[in-house]
Image (spheres, grey):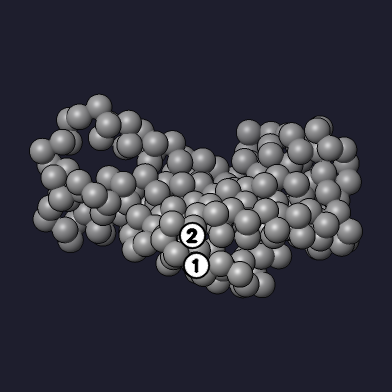
C-alpha cells in the first residue's frame, strides 16, 4: 500500500469518495425510509416556493431526483448521496487551504467515520445534505478571500475583479445554504464576528 503524501493525498481522497459513494448508493436503495423522510417526501411531490417548517431547496432537489430515477427510496435519496460526495471533496480542499493535503484527507476520513454524517446526512433524504454542501462551498470562498494566500493584501485588492467574483460566490453559496436550512445563520454570524474582530478585514 502506498504511503500517504502531499502529492497523492488528493487521489487517496478521490478513491475514498468513490468507495463511500458506492456503499451509500446501496444503503440508499435497500434501506427503508425513516419517519422524517416519510414526512419530507410528500413535499417533493407537491412543490412550492416555501413550506411551513423547512426551506424549499431539498424538496426541489428531491423532486428532480424522483423525476430522473423514479419514486423509489433510491430516487428520493440520490441527491443527498451525490451532494455528500461533493461535501467530502470540499472538506478536503478547505482543509488543504488551511493546513495541507494530508490533513485534508484525514478530515474527510473522520467526517466519513461519523455516523451522523456518513448515514443520516449522506444517505437519507434530509435538508442537511444541501446545507452541508453549500455551507462548505461558502467556507471555501470565504477562506480564499480572508485566510488563504494573498488574503493579507486583501485591502489593496478589494476592488479587483477576482475579489468581487469571490464575494458574489460567497453570497450565492450562502443563499443556497439558507434555502437548505436556517442553521446557516451561524456561518453568517461567524463571518461577521471574524470581520469585526480582525482589523485587517474590516475594510
Residue sitting farthest toward the top: 161
Q: Is residue 118 above or below residue 159?
A: below
Secondary structure state at the residue bearing disc 2:
helix
Residue 150 can be seen, yes or no: yes
Above or below, 61 against 186 in this view is above
Residue 169 x, y percent position in the rendering? 39, 36
Residue at position x 75%, y 47% in the image:
78
Q: Residues within 10 Å of mark 1 (few under 14, many from 20)?
A: some
- Which residue is at a point 12% across and 42% down the rendered structure image? 155
Quadrant where the image shows the C terminus: top left
Write down the quadrant of residue 98 in the picture: bottom left
Q: Position of residue 76 (x, y in %)?
A: 79, 46
Residue 9's label in the rendered image is 2
Quadrant for the N terminus in the image: bottom right
Task: Answer yes or no: is residue 95 visible.
Answer: no
The x and y percentages for residue 52 are 65, 47
Which residue shows up at 66% across the image and 72% down it? 115
Q: Which residue is mark 1?
A: 4
> At x 56% / y 67%, what residue is drawn?
2
Residue closer to the observer: 114 or 100 = 100
Q: Which mark is residue 61?
A: none
Q: Tell me which numbered mark, 1 or 2, is placed earlier along the sequence.
A: 1
From what the image shows, is residue 82 above or below residue 163?
Answer: below
Q: Judging from the image, what secondary structure is the residue with disc 1 in? A: loop
Residue 99 falls in image quadrant: bottom left
Residue 136 lies left or right of residue 117; in this view the side is: left
Q: Answer whether labels 1 and 2 touch (C-beta < 8 Å).
A: yes
Q: In the picture provided, is 30 more to the left or to the right than 9?
A: right
Amino acid at each position: 500500500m502506498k504511503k500517504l503524501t502531499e502529492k497523492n493525498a488528493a487521489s487517496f481522497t478521490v478513491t475514498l469518495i468513490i468507495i463511500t459513494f458506492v456503499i451509500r448508493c446501496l444503503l440508499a436503495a435497500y434501506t427503508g425510509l425513516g419517519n422524517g423522510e416519510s414526512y419530507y417526501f410528500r413535499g417533493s411531490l407537491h412543490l412550492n416556493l416555501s413550506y411551513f417548517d423547512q426551506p424549499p431547496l431539498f424538496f426541489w432537489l428531491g423532486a428532480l431526483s424522483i423525476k430522473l430515477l423514479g419514486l423509489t427510496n433510491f430516487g428520493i435519496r440520490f441527491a443527498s448521496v451525490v451532494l455528500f460526495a461533493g461535501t467530502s471533496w470540499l472538506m478536503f480542499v478547505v482543509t488543504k487551504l488551511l493546513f495541507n493535503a494530508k490533513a485534508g484527507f484525514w478530515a474527510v476520513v473522520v467526517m466519513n467515520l461519523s455516523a451522523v454524517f456518513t448515514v443520516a446526512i449522506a444517505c437519507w433524504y434530509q435538508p442537511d445534505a444541501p446545507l452541508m454542501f453549500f455551507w462548505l462551498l461558502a467556507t471555501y470562498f470565504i477562506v480564499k478571500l480572508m485566510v488563504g494566500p494573498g488574503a493579507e493584501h486583501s485591502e489593496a485588492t478589494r476592488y479587483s475583479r477576482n475579489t468581487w467574483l469571490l464575494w458574489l460566490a460567497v453570497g450565492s453559496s450562502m443563499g443556497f445554504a439558507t434555502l437548505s436550512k436556517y442553521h446557516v445563520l451561524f456561518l453568517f454570524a461567524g463571518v461577521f464576528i471574524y470581520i469585526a474582530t480582525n482589523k485587517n478585514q474590516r475594510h
